[in-house]
């Protein structure tokens, strides 16, 4: 087995495309839209990076989600994104509230760890 770790944020991935998700988001408060979109972008980038390495979503073992205080009231939205993009068995997830993130405007950053079987 070989290990794979990544550190990605919404800043590392381009803006999400304008789709049905955008329409759904417009009816939600700004803080929910912002956090949800950032979580979708970040987890999408993680899955794309894993796929480029030959990994599948089920190879994801754990995530650490760093969120800002403004994201805390709507943090449950991140669990919804994880359920939509990942499948059982879900990776272990830890949430940590921090005063701020390195990139202005970000509410979430994720550090992920995956185990990719040799030969994949």
Image (cartoon, rainbow, N blue to C red):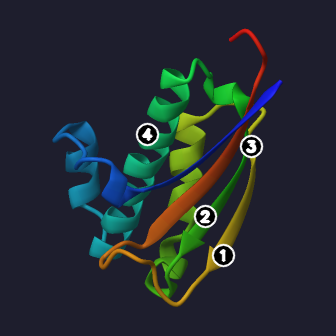
Numbered badge on residue 106: none
Residue 68 versus residue 41 in the image, above or below: below
Q: Which residue is mark 3?
A: 91
**Which image quarter: residue 28?**
bottom left
The quadrant of the picture occupied by the C terminus is top right
Q: Which residue is mark 2?
A: 65
Q: Secondary structure at mark 2?
A: strand
Q: Secondary structure at mark 1?
A: strand
Residue 20 at x, y = what percent?
Answer: 23, 38
The quadrant of the picture occupied by the N terminus is top right
What is the distance, in whole Å, between disc 4 and disc 1 at their CAs? 20 Å
What is the distance, in whole Å, between disc 4 and disc 3 at their CAs? 15 Å
Q: Which residue is mark 4?
A: 44
Question: In terms of sequence position, does the residue under pointer 2 or pointer 3 come before the other?
Answer: 2
How would you rate the neighbour count of disc 4 (Cα within 10 Å): few for under 14, some for 14-19, many for 20 or more? some
Outermost residue toward the left in this view? 18
Residue 39 at x, y = what percent?
Answer: 45, 55
Determine the residue positioned at 78% across, 19% down: 117
Q: How many marks?
A: 4
Q: Are marks 1 and 2 in contact (CB under 8 Å)?
A: yes
What is the distance, in whole Å, between disc 2 and disc 3 at their CAs? 12 Å
Toward the viewer: 73 or 64? 64
Q: Which residue is mark 1?
A: 96
Q: Are marks 2 and 4 in contact (CB under 8 Å)?
A: no
What is the distance, in whole Å, between disc 1 and disc 2 at their CAs? 6 Å
How would you rate the neighbour count of disc 2 (Cα within 10 Å): few for under 14, some for 14-19, many for 20 or more? many
**Which image quarter: residue 118?**
top right
């Amino acid at each position: 087995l070989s290990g794979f770790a990544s550190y990605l944020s919404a800043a590392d991935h381009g803006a999400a495309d304008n789709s049905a998700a955008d329409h759904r988001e417009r009816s939600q408060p700004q803080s929910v839209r912002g956090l949800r979109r950032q979580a979708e972008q970040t987890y999408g980038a993680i899955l794309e990076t894993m796929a480029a390495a030959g990994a599948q979503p089920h190879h994801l073992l754990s995530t650490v989600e760093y969120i800002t205080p403004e994201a805390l009231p709507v943090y449950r939205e991140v669990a919804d994104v994880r359920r939509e993009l990942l499948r059982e068995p879900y990776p272990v997830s830890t949430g940590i509230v921090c005063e701020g993130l390195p990139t202005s405007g970000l509410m979430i950053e994720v550090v992920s760890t995956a185990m990719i079987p040799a030969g994949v």
